Image (tube, helix red, strand yellow):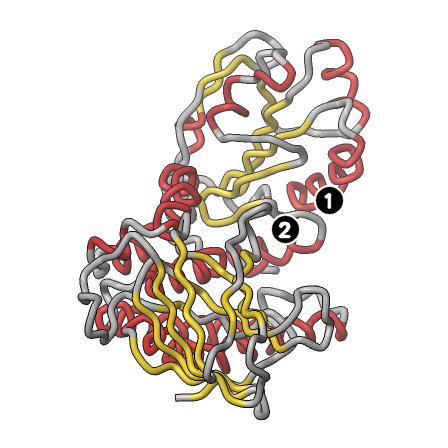
Amino acid sequence: MKLKHRHFAVILVFLGLFGNSENLTAQALSKLHLAGTIKGVAEGTEVHLVSSTLQGWSIPPAKVVKATFNLEAELPQPDLFVLTIGSLQDEKALRFQVFLDNEIVELAIDATANSIQLISGASPVAFTELMQSFGPQFDNLSSISRQRQVSGGSGFYSDSLAKAWDKQLAEIAQGIGPFVQKHPNTAVSAFLLSTVWPLYNNVQQMDGWLGLMGPVAKESIFAKSLDEQMGSERTLGYGQVAPDFIQADPDGKQVSLKDFRGKYVLVDFWASWCGPCRQENPNVVQAFQKYKNKNFTVIGVSLDRDKPRWLQAISDDQLTWPHVSDLKFWQNEVAKLYKVSSIPQNYLLDPEGRIIGKNLRGAALEEFLAKTLGSN
């Protein structure tokens, strides 16, 4: 199978969970063993392997001898590397982006055609399949996103482009499980899951896919990174019951989030000193006035530390919903519980207290509420 060289970071090649060699076994190795044949370059041409992400990491170059080259390296982690045929300073040097692990890799390069052929290794085969299966679908997502930007439409939850986006996401999701089942023990599967995670942010769905992976994939850097990303989502992800909290209102009365079960609740983190929050407040007021009789309310959680200024902002901005604060600034206990690192920030909860929306601002908040509660 051949992959054409491209000048941008699109083709990633995960090389080598196991391969064929007289001297090396197909078991897990502590080094990368990369053997290649190459057509169309002069004897003695240097072959460099440079990490795309690990600053300062490098190994001595190999040289082309009788149209072949060999590279050995102890890679710190499976990752994206650039295989350069020629001088690193030569802008016209042939470059291939490859994803390598400490495994056996055999490949053939044709410099005259700017192509690389994968000869051995389960992971390169899996990644080529990934590109063939999911590449066009991700291209479609990019196209839909560009169309929405060009159209300038804000109807994310109702327009035809939004429906096309959701349909494409559903098609991608249908293929992920079978792919991971087919390639359970390659870093490629973990790479795929870490790539699609931002598109879904669904812990239950992702846990199902993770359960299909074998130990090799689960030990990869991508699986570990994914686990870290999912950490907060396990408590604050879509579909999760929002953590309960109790905090005092301006009169000192203790207010509990559970007291609002049965309503749609926007938990809104803000502060009187926060310019973007004050600019957003009119949008929240408009949404509250429009939907307060449709089982919707807001709870304002303030990161203020000056009570008079907090109360003055509530009055000035006409925020006529419940408010709480412990006046601890960024150390507000509710903000810490919800891992708030910037404001404004909000979570929309359904009547069962489950998170159904995040950071809905401006027109997006009104559109979401219209879709959920009805616009009439």
Q: Amino acid at mark 2?
A: Leu
Query: On the image, numbered disc 1 is attached to which residue?
Result: 283
Please give the name of the residue rendered at 30% of the width and 67% of the height, measured from the top-left corner: 104
Residue 314: where, in percent of width, then height?
73, 23
Q: Amino acid at mark 1?
A: Asn
Q: Alpha-carbon neighbours of circle 1 within 10 Å: few (<14), some, or many (≥20)?
A: some
Q: Alpha-carbon neighbours of circle 2 within 10 Å: few (<14), some, or many (≥20)?
A: many
Q: Can residue 351 be spotted in the picture?
A: no
| Disc 2, SS | helix
| Disc 1, SS | helix
Q: Nearer the viewer, residue 188 or 19?
A: 19
Q: CA distance from mark 2 to mark 1?
A: 8 Å
Q: Nearer the viewer, residue 79 or 23?
A: 23
Please give the name of the residue rendered at 62% of the width and 19% of the height, measured from the top-left corner: 330
* Circle nearer the N terminus (2, 1): 1
Residue 268: where, in percent of width, then height?
60, 34
Q: Note whether 111 is above or below 76 in the view shown.
A: below
The quarter of the displayed image where residue 171 is located: bottom left
The quarter in which the N terminus is drawn is bottom left
Q: Nearer the viewer, residue 143 or 57?
A: 57
Query: On the image, numbered disc 2 is attached to which residue?
Result: 365
Q: Is residue 279 left or right of residue 39?
A: right
Q: Note whether 38 is above or below 376 in the view shown.
A: below
Q: Residue furthest bottom?
A: 113
The quarter of the displayed image where residue 178 is located: bottom left
